[in-house]
């Protein structure tokens, strides 16, 4: 969410002072109504890495969005842009033929992808068919053609924290964000025309405060919902990153151990 201009407090962006001391990249690069994807991130991150390397420095990726990290290092499928006419035809067929028949068509043309998709998953069924019709290749074919930037020299460092301490820090952080003007930030974005239907405004914190501003939740309920969703997200993060066997894990306060590993790696 830090890629979006104006989504500052809720995304936990580094302060301007921090960004003046240490160069940060891929922050404030698109407006909130842009549908930013993992593919966009890979392109922006690669460009940033080239800039960093030219200055004689080493790129350092910091963050918790596992999909973006894995997309860059493990690789992401490069799928051509599908013509809007293909999507429009499929939408009409959905109304006329029904989802069940479209799913059976997907089973026929891309059994590998269809096997991963529930028969009621409208979005993924349509996506599978639009890629097949638009490119002549099944979506699963693109999954097998990934090129990532990971190498034997890539160093992964993970920070761990006791569950109770993590929950306490999450709660304090949410309270601090509210105190820093998070509600006012969301209200200001809405006044600028960035409504609750945008992907950026559906992210954790923004979605709940939009519900508050629409009168569907009290502020107290919205804050509690943010804390709950953030706890769930933190749990998903740990599950995601622990699948990567190359991560060396540390407690967050083990600074000297981390420093020693980095110096050895360098």
Image (spheres, rainbow, N blue to C red):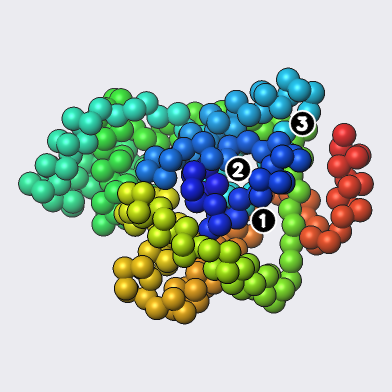
Between disc 2 and disc 1, whose residue precedes? 2
Give the residue at x 22% y 36%: 87
Are the residues flagged by discs 3 and 2 in contact, CB closer than 8 Å? no
Residue at the extreme top of the image, as rendered: 54
Are the residues flagged by discs 2 and 1 in contact, CB closer than 8 Å? no
Per the model, the C-alpha gap separating discs 2 and 1 is 13 Å
Seen from the viewer's position, the closer of residues 17 and 164 is: 17
Residue 69: image tag: 2
19 left or right, relative to 29: right
As drawn, 38 above or below 146: below
| Residue tagged 1 | 242
31 left or right, relative to 256: left
Seen from the viewer's position, the closer of residues 79 and 5 is: 5
Q: Percent from the top left, x then y, of residue 32?
A: 42, 45
Say what secondary structure mark 1 lies in: loop
Say what secondary structure mark 2 lies in: helix
As drawn, 47 above or below 31: above
Residue 178: image tag: none
| Residue tagged 3 | 58
Can residue 148 be seen?
A: no
Give the residue at x 50% y 51%: 7
Between disc 3 and disc 1, whose residue precedes? 3
115 left or right, relative to 180: left
């Amino acid at each position: 969410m830090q890629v979006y201009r104006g989504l500052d407090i809720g995304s936990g962006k580094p302060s301007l002072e921090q960004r003046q001391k240490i160069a940060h990249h891929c922050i404030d690069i698109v407006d909130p109504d842009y549908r930013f994807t993992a593919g966009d991130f890979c392109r922006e991150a690669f460009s940033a890495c080239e800039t960093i390397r030219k200055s004689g420095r080493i790129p350092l990726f910091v963050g918790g969005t596992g999909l973006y990290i894995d997309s860059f290092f493990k690789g992401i499928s490069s799928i051509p842009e599908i013509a809007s006419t293909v999507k429009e035809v499929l939408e009409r067929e959905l109304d006329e033929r029904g989802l069940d028949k479209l799913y059976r068509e997907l089973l026929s043309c891309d059994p590998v992808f269809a096997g991963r998709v529930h028969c009621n998953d409208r979005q993924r069924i349509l996506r599978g068919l639009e890629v097949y019709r638009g490119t002549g290749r099944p979506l699963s074919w693109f999954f097998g053609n990934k090129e990532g930037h990971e190498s034997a020299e890539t160093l992964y460092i993970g920070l761990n924290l006791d569950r109770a301490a993590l929950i306490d820090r999450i709660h304090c952080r949410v309270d601090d964000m509210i105190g820093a003007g998070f509600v006012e930030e969301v209200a200001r974005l809405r006044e600028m025309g960035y409504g609750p239907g945008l992907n950026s405004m559906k992210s954790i914190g923004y979605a709940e405060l939009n519900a508050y501003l629409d009168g569907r939740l009290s502020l107290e309920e919205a804050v509690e919902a943010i804390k709950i969703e953030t706890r769930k997200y933190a749990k998903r993060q740990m599950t995601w990153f622990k699948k990567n066997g190359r991560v060396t894990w540390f407690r967050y306060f083990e600074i000297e151990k981390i420093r020693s590993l980095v110096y050895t790696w360098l």
